[in-house]
Every structure is written in structure tokens, then in C-alpha cells.
Image (tube, rainbow, N blue to C red):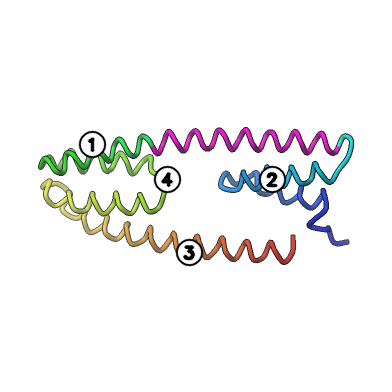
Amino acid sequence: MKLDPHSAEGYALRASVYVEDEDLLADAAADYGRAAMLSEGDDREGFEASKAEAEAALKRRDARRATLKKAHEDLKAVADDAFRGGRFLEAVKKYGEALRVVEDDDDRAKLFSNRSAAGPKSNIQPDVSVFDSFDARFCAVLRELDESDRFFQKSAESTSI
């Protein structure tokens, strides 16, 4: 028996998978909403409760990401000021701290690149620039692979559940 992907059960099944991945919480909430619209009674109430939980998780995730983004931007600004001021050791340390909180691959690549520029000038860890340049390129490759994977997953989802 094949499950109709456009039934309440189909949307709920897909949402239950989406809710496990914080990048797909918005999709989970939307699919629980669709499931609720297509159902009645206790099922509808359950799907609406699941939608509310997914939306609450989405808000928590967004708040956490905003906090991390702010921390990353603040640390990067301090590191940039240190670099411009010739305090390269401080710049290397602050770029490193920013790398611990950054989530975006583009931002991560920029931080690696900036730290690799400051590393040799700081007279510490002369090889840091080599590794950071590699890490910046590696982040770009991972981002491309991730985008390809998302495209493949969306294509697969559009053909079956």
C-alpha cells in the first residue's frame, strides 16, 4: 500500500522527518498545518499541536542563530580592528573565537581567510595560513556539495514521499 503524499498522513509523515533537522523546521510546521487542514477531530488537534511545537522550535532555533550571528559579527569586528591596528596575535585569537560560533559557511570561509592573513604576521604558528587557506577552500566545496544534496533531496521528494 502506497501512502498518498498529499494526504494528511503523508504530510504528517514528511513533517515528522523534517522536524528532526533544524534547517527544515519551517517545512515541518507547514506540513503539519497541511495535515491539520486535511483531517478532522483528534487527528486535527494532534497535528495542530505538532505544528505549534515545530513553530516554537523554529523560533528557538532562530533566536539561537541570531545570538550566534551577533557574537560572530562582534568577534570579527574586534579581530578586524586588531588586524588594522597591527595587533596580529590578537586578530588570530579573535578570528579563532569567531570560528567557534559561526554557522554560515561563507562567513566561516572569510574568517579562515582573514586568520590566514594575520597568522604569518603574528609570528606564531607559521603554518596556520596554509591550513586556513585549505579550510576556506574546503568550506566552499562543502557548501557546493550541500547545495547539490538539497537539490537532489527536493527532486526526490517531488517525485515520491
Residue mark closest to the camera, 1 vs 2: 2
Read off the residue under disc 3: 145
Between the residue at mark 3 and the residue at mark 4, the CA separation in whole angstroms equals 16 Å
User: Could you tell which of marks 3 and 4 lies nearer the N-terminus?
Assistant: 4
Callout 1 crowding tier (Cα within 10 Å): few <14, some 14–19, many ≥20: some
Read off the residue under disc 4: 103
CB under 8 Å between discs 4 and 1: no
| Position of the N terminus by quadrant | bottom right
CB under 8 Å between discs 4 and 2: no
Residue 113 pos. (x, y %): 26, 54
Task: Please tell me which residue is depicted at 23% across the width and 49% down the height of the picture.
Answer: 115
**Residue 134, placed above or below residue 62:** below
Label at residue 78? 1
Callout 3 crowding tier (Cα within 10 Å): few <14, some 14–19, many ≥20: few
**Secondary structure under the numbered disc 2 in the rendered image:** helix
Between the residue at mark 4 and the residue at mark 1, the CA separation in whole angstroms equals 18 Å
Q: Amino acid at mark 4?
A: Glu
**Secondary structure under the numbered disc 4 in the rendered image:** loop
The region drawn magenta spans 43-69
Residue 76 pos. (x, y %): 28, 41
